[in-house]
Amino acid sequence: MYIHQLSEKHSVLHHFLSEIRDQSIQKDRMRFRRNIERIGEILTYEMSMSFSFSDKETITPLGKKGCVEISNKIVVCSILRAGLPLHQGIINYLDGADCSFISAYRCHTSETDFEIHVEYLASQDLDNKTLILADPMLATGQSILATFDALTKVGLPKEVHILSVIGARPGIAFLQKKLPKETHLWIGDIDAKLNEKGYIIPGLGDAGDLAFGEKLQK
Ligand SMILES: O=P(O)(O)OC[C@H]1O[C@H](OP(=O)(O)OP(=O)(O)O)[C@H](O)[C@@H]1O
Ligand SMILES: O=c1cc[nH]c(=O)[nH]1
Ligand SMILES: [Mg+2]
């Protein structure tokens, strides 16, 4: 897996990362969602430099200009529910992309153990497409793997890009073992560890709850 950690360079991204982690600022739910969306825009801009482009001619009011346009056929698939604001950030920049949605949630068998349940999938044909799989939190990596497995039953994408805001080192190492080598991971920041409940430390807490409100545990 090719890992592109955007926090390696200092940029405005650090401002947004700091705000989503800050326990007082993140209480503003609207700001939290908007910051995740803004990070989605930044990740998409960086990822777009790896896309294919074809030439086109654009007519301006005063002449002609040789321009380029993205030639990848893109499907953005986001994992419900925390993926929704990230999804919005991605499609803010990829105007014509198809959008798929998949649900994945942690179903707890005990205080510390859980399984990932995938129950809902609405997807386009993925054959030969550029698949962007979006989830703001990459903790154990199990949600991404379960959704990747469900999606690759629908078709065989030409390339796969995973977009995430904060990841944990053990979850990334897990995906490195399980996903095809040519998969790209575009990630805002990487934290060192997980706690016994599978939360990223220091992370930011529960992204789905912060964006949309605390859900009842199953
Ligand atoms: O890498 P993992 O260990 O699989 O954890 C990451 C997943 O956990 C969260 O989802 P959650 O189950 O909390 O659902 P939610 O989006 O509805 O809050 C998060 O949004 C990821 O999908
Ligand atoms: O730290 C974590 C782990 C999973 N899901 C979250 O929202 N946060
Ligand atoms: Mg959650």
Image (tube, rainbow, N blue to C red):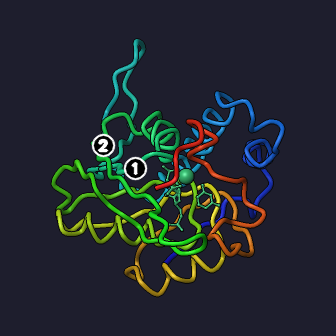
Please give left or right for residue 123 compared with residue 12 in the image.
left
Residue at screen point 40% across, 79% down: 179
Please tell me how crowded label 2 is: few (under 14), some (14-19), or many (20+) other residues with Cα within 10 Å: some
State how far apart marks 2 and 1 are (Cα): 8 Å
Is residue 190 visible to us here?
A: yes
First along the sequence among labels 2 and 1? 1
Is residue 54 visible to us here?
A: no
Please tell me how crowded label 1 is: few (under 14), some (14-19), or many (20+) other residues with Cα within 10 Å: many
Q: Is residue 100 above or below residue 28?
A: below
Q: Which of the 4 quarters of the picture holds residue 58?
A: top left
Pick out the residue farthest to the bottom. 177
Check contact, mark 2 vs mark 1: CB within 8 A: yes
Q: Looking at the rendered structure, which numbered label has been put on residue 186?
A: none
Q: Amino acid at mark 1?
A: Ser
Q: Amino acid at mark 2?
A: Cys
Q: Nearer the viewer, mark 2 or mark 1?
A: 1
Q: Looking at the rendered structure, which numbered label has been put on residue 78?
A: 1
Q: Is residue 108 above or below residue 211?
A: below
Please give left or right for residue 125 compared with residue 76 in the image.
left
Q: Position of residue 217 (x, y in %)?
A: 52, 53
Q: Position of residue 103 (x, y in %)?
A: 35, 53
Foreground of the two, 12 or 133: 133
Judged from the image, the secondary structure of the residue bearing numbered disc 1 is strand
Q: Does mark 1's beta carbon lie closer than 8 Å to ligand 1?
A: no
Q: Position of residue 113 (x, y in %)?
A: 53, 75
- For disc 2, the marked residue is 99
